[in-house]
Image (cartoon, helix red, strand yellow):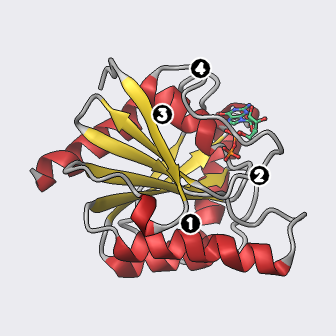
């Protein structure tokens, strides 16, 4: 999909602050540093629509982006940032959980995992939640340019096994840097959107 006019709408923490729109939403979830901002920018073909907070990994708001008045991208706070207190961590968990549980127009969750690392406990919790929710989803493995094609394939298999994913699970290896996999991911999003409409 060629995005013409992507716009930042609002940063929200509480459900009352979420924007009122009739558009369907795709949420992006992942650890801080997994590459969420870079992936959103690659999908919309902009350099700086989404950006990490000034202190990396510290953004705890949910950022909403309007994609050509067709759908919304929802950037959830990155979880698992080591340098925050337990209280802050549970607050971030709540912000994410609340959005996932209360938002009726949410119809797809994209889970990002750095292809080089094994999934963390938080990643596994998130993956299981998504799977059990019955929502459409895609597991995106980021930063593939950092590995050879062979190594990347190997990592897909290893990550799939760590997640306990079934044989029907789709994994999307991508690189925001060289745009590997970006068209394939858009095709998956488009297909889900067609099924919804
Ligand atoms: P976020 O915290 O999940 O939003 O992650 P960012 O998008 O800010 O990315 C975290 C770091 O990984 C930054 O230094 C990015 O430049 C880098 N990064 C993200 N995606 C890629 C990628 O596809 N390839 C490479 N080589 N680096 C990436």
Decide: marks 2, 4 in contact (CB < 8 A)? Answer: no
Q: Is residue 118 above or below residue 148?
A: below
Q: Secondary structure at mark 4?
A: loop
Q: Which mark is residue 160?
A: 1
Alpha carbon distance from label 1 to label 2: 25 Å
Alpha carbon distance from label 2 to label 3: 25 Å
Residue at image point 62% right, 58% down = 77
In the rendered image, which quarter is residue 173 located in? top right
Labels 2 and 4: the sequence-earlier one: 4
Could you tell whether 84 is left or right of 53 in the image?
right
Could you tell whether 95 is left or right of 120 in the image?
left
Q: Which residue is mark 4?
A: 47
Q: Secondary structure at mark 2?
A: loop
Mark 2 vs mark 3, foreground winner is 2
Q: Secondary structure at mark 1?
A: helix
Whether residue 121 is visible, yes or no, is: no
User: CB of residue at label 2: within 8 Å of ligand 1?
Assistant: yes
Decide: marks 1, 2 in contact (CB < 8 A)? Answer: no
Alpha carbon distance from label 3 to label 1: 18 Å
Labels 3 and 1: the sequence-earlier one: 1
Mark 3 vs mark 1, foreground winner is 3
Alpha carbon distance from label 4 to label 3: 17 Å
In the rendered image, which quarter is residue 184 located in? top left
Q: Which mark is residue 181?
A: 3
Labels 4 and 3: the sequence-earlier one: 4
Q: Is residue 83 above or below residue 68?
A: below
Residue 174: x %, y % from top left: 55, 37
């Amino acid at each position: 999909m060629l995005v013409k006019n992507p716009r930042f709408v609002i940063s929200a923490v509480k459900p009352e602050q979420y924007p009122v729109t009739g558009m369907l939403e795709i949420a992006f979830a992942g650890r801080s540093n997994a590459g969420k901002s870079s992936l959103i920018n690659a999908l919309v073909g902009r350099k700086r629509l989404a950006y990490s907070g000034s202190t990396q990994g510290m953004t705890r708001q949910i950022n909403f982006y309007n994609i050509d008045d067709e759908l919304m991208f929802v950037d959830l706070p990155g979880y698992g940032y080591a340098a925050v207190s337990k209280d802050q961590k549970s607050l971030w968990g709540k912000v994410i959980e609340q959005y996932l549980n209360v938002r009726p127009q949410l119809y797809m969750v994209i889970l990002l995992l750095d292809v080089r690392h094994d999934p963390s406990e938080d990643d596994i919790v998130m993956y299981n939640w998504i799977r059990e929710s019955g929502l459409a989803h895609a597991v995106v493995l980021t930063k593939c340019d950092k590995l050879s094609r062979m190594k990347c394939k190997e990592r897909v298999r290893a990550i799939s096994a760590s997640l306990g994913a079934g044989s029907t699970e789709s994994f999307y290896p991508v690189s925001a840097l060289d745009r590997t996999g970006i068209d394939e991911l858009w095709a998956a999003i488009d297909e889900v959107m067609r099924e919804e409409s």
